[in-house]
Amino acid sequence: MTAKMYYDADVSMQPLADKVVAVIGYGSQAHAHAQNMHDSGVNVIIGLREGSGSRAKAEQAGLQVMSIPEATQAADVVALLIPDEEQPKVYAEQMAPHLTAGKTLLFGHGFNVHFGRITPPAEVDVMLVAPKGPGHMLRRVYKEGAGMPGIFAVGQDASGHARDTALAYARAIGCTRAGVLETTFKEETETDLFGEQAVLCGGVTQLIQSGFETLVEAGYQPEIAYFETLHEVKLIVDLIYEKGFEGMRHSISNTAEFGDYVTGPRIVNARTKEEMKQVLADIQSGAFADRFTADYQGGFSHMNEQRGKMRGHQLETVGKELRRKMPFINQEELEV
Ligand SMILES: NC(=O)C1=CN([C@@H]2O[C@H](COP(=O)(O)OP(=O)(O)OC[C@H]3O[C@@H](n4cnc5c(N)ncnc54)[C@H](OP(=O)(O)O)[C@@H]3O)[C@@H](O)[C@H]2O)C=CC1
Ligand SMILES: CC(=O)[C@](C)(O)C(=O)O
Ligand SMILES: [Mg+2]
Ligand SMILES: [Mg+2]
């Protein structure tokens, strides 16, 4: 192992002991950070916009809610956890005037600092703590007593002890239970964007959808196609997650393993990897960030078109019905 890994025993929560931490927002990451820190004994307050629909949910969780400027003013550490595209304006108008010397500004992703959309003042500590997974799962695994790996970076160390604050925060949200390591804003931003686009979100959904469509278009029953190309993904991935490729391949049949070696490289091939390199180049150059910002400024027309397209897809409608009959699958709406 070359990276220095940090676990619970390596990290003190002392840097947050007499501090107030404001979490700005109460969405996927924010509610998980806030509730995990609250359960870890940190003094957490929430900053929300006027008329926010999340106020009641945060208060129900026992958290004190304020306006964003008030929370920024009241806190020692301010975690900005609203959508990346919304951050620059909210930061400039409601937070920057209250970010006085000695405070800490913390991000869950390096996007806005790395791409120059937010430039914090020199007298504050600037850091990121990025859990490697969705916010709702960050909360779920914490409640189960487990943790989610995370990475942290110090962008600016005005106080001289920014690293200790970042590590304490990573521990408070449960990341040091699973393993934490140090990165830079650049490395976190580029690897996170690449991972979610090429593999985790874009890659996985396209692979599932193409497999499902291939079977259905060939006349097979959509329910079988759903079980085969979507439901079972989790079962296979759980084995990879627990035991790596070799452990997964130990569990599957020799027939499946042979087909895996023969067919895998036909589906994800040298062209795919070449394309992945282009995707990474677009991320590194800022071209993807510009495209994302432009779509946001145009009312997210591309994003909304894509959302609409998938909503009525057979993969989704059949899946919804099948999942309803599986009581062991969490049937509750996501908490926020
Ligand atoms: N989603 C994830 O799992 C991950 C996210 N991240 C990073 O975490 C950050 C937050 O992302 P995510 O959790 O997905 O965000 P969400 O989309 O879940 O954020 C929603 C929250 O942001 C608030 N909000 C939205 N717009 C505004 C605005 N203009 N003014 C004030 N509040 C606003 C909403 O307020 P209201 O409640 O009033 O509607 C809501 O509380 C990003 O930097 C992201 O890259 C990092 C790792 C994983
Ligand atoms: C969940 C997570 O890690 C992502 C995919 O990076 C994100 O939601 O931005
Ligand atoms: Mg991520
Ligand atoms: Mg991300």
Image: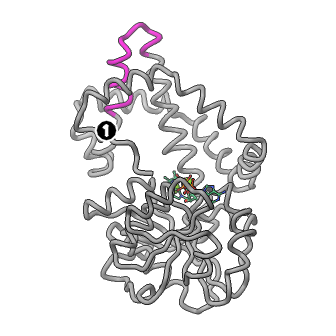
State the image coordinates of residue 73 (x, y, percent, origin top left): 62, 81
| Magenta stretch bounds | 215-232
**Residue wearing tag 1:** 331
Q: Is residue 304 above or below residue 181?
A: above
Query: Residue at coordinates 59% horizontally, 53% vertically from top-left?
Result: 193
Q: Is residue 7 above or below residue 303?
A: below
Decide which of 241, 142 is in the foreground and name it.
142
- Indicate the secondary structure of the residue bearing disc 1: loop
Query: Residue at coordinates 40% horizontally, 50% vertically from top-left?
Result: 335
CB of residue at label 1: within 8 Å of ligand 1? no
Decide which of 125, 41 is in the foreground and name it.
41
Number of marks drawn: 1
Seen as rendered, the residue at the extreme top is 219
Is 227 included in the stretch rendered in magenta?
Answer: yes
Q: Is residue 219 above or below residue 240?
A: above
State the image coordinates of residue 228 (x, y, percent, origin top left): 33, 25
> Badge 1: few (under 14), some or many (20 or more) residues near its Cα, within 10 Å?
few
Q: Quadrant of residue 1?
A: bottom left
Q: Is residue 245 left or right of residue 18?
A: left
Query: Residue at coordinates 30% horizontally, 41% vertically from top-left?
Result: 330
Decide which of 229, 31 is in the foreground and name it.
31
Q: Residue flagged by tag 1: what amino acid is it?
A: Gln
State the image coordinates of residue 292 (x, y, percent, origin top left): 71, 47
User: Dominant secondary structure of the magenta stretch?
Assistant: helix
Is 256 included in the stretch rendered in magenta?
Answer: no
